[in-house]
Image: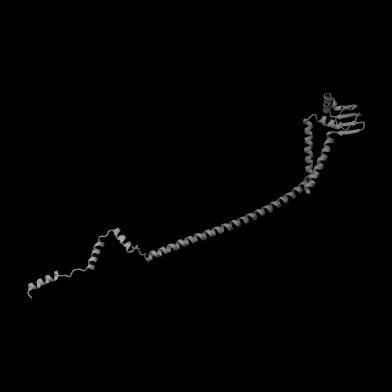
Amino acid sequence: MSKSSKVEQGKTNRGSSPAPDSASLRRAALLDTEEFLSYDDFWRQQSATGGAIKKVERRKTPQEIAAAEAEALLSSAREEAAKVMQDAYDQGFAEGEAAGLAKAKGEYQERIAKLGSLLSALDGQRADVLRQHEEHLLELIKTMVDRLVNHEVSVNPLVIKACLQKAMDYVVENSTVQVHLHADDFNRIKKISLDDPSLLAGKNRVQLVEDPQIGVGGCFLKTDFGEIDATLEQSRARLFAVVEKAFSAALAANNG
């Protein structure tokens, strides 16, 4: 075969390649279509064919896993420690409160006992003092009473009028009476009887007698039936007797 014949034969062989079949054409068309699908069309195609897009997650390194576990353990330990501390605080507070109350109650009872002992001792000492000084106390009371009486006589000149009226109540009607008075009271009674005649009314004879032995504020009456001592000294003696009786009764009640 000549060289020109071989060239012609080669052209014939290249130009006569077999025609593509229908399946190859469909695949080519599909590839061309998929290459130009939009994002929405592609998403609808994946949904229709049941395709799923999986989210790609980055795998953690061993160091990151260990750090996360350590942080979880540390957080749990903190919570447990806080709970233990709170429980201990609550228990300690309750125990401390109970102990404080018990201690305060004990101290209070102790002080009450000491106070009771002190009061008992004071009562005993007071009784001893009263027994030792009762005579002095009685004299002191008498002195106070005496000063009160003398003060009343000194500032109230009409004391003699009240004294005489009281004494005249014991005089029997229609009897002769001599009234012994201090000079000052003598003049007072004379003046009062002139202003008030009823002071000596109902008696037959009343004679006023100055007597230096009679103190101011008192009088001494002599009648046909006896004598009536209304002197200030006698009145004071009767008053002292009443005071002494009351004082003795008070001591007896206190010692009892």
Q: Is residue 215 visible?
A: no
Q: Position of residue 137 (x, y in %)?
A: 78, 43
Judged left or right of residue 169, residue 86 is left
Judged left or right of residue 145, residue 1 is left
Q: Position of residue 186 (x, y in %)?
A: 84, 27
Q: Is residue 229 visible?
A: yes
Most extreme residue toward the right is: 224
Foreground of the two, 53 or 237: 53
The N terminus: image quadrant: bottom left
Q: Position of residue 100 (x, y in %)?
A: 60, 55
Residue depicted at 76% across the width and 48% down the height: 127
Residue depicted at 80% across the width and 44% down the height: 249
Residue depicted at 41% across the width and 63% down the height: 68
- 108 versus 14 height, above or below: above
Most extreme residue toward the front is: 22
Residue depicted at 12% across the width and 70% down the height: 12
Colour scheme of the picture: one colour
Q: Position of residue 85 (x, y in %)?
A: 52, 59
Query: What is the quadrant of residue 94 in the picture?
Result: bottom right
Query: What is the quadrant of residue 170 in the picture?
Result: top right
Foreground of the two, 97 or 220: 97
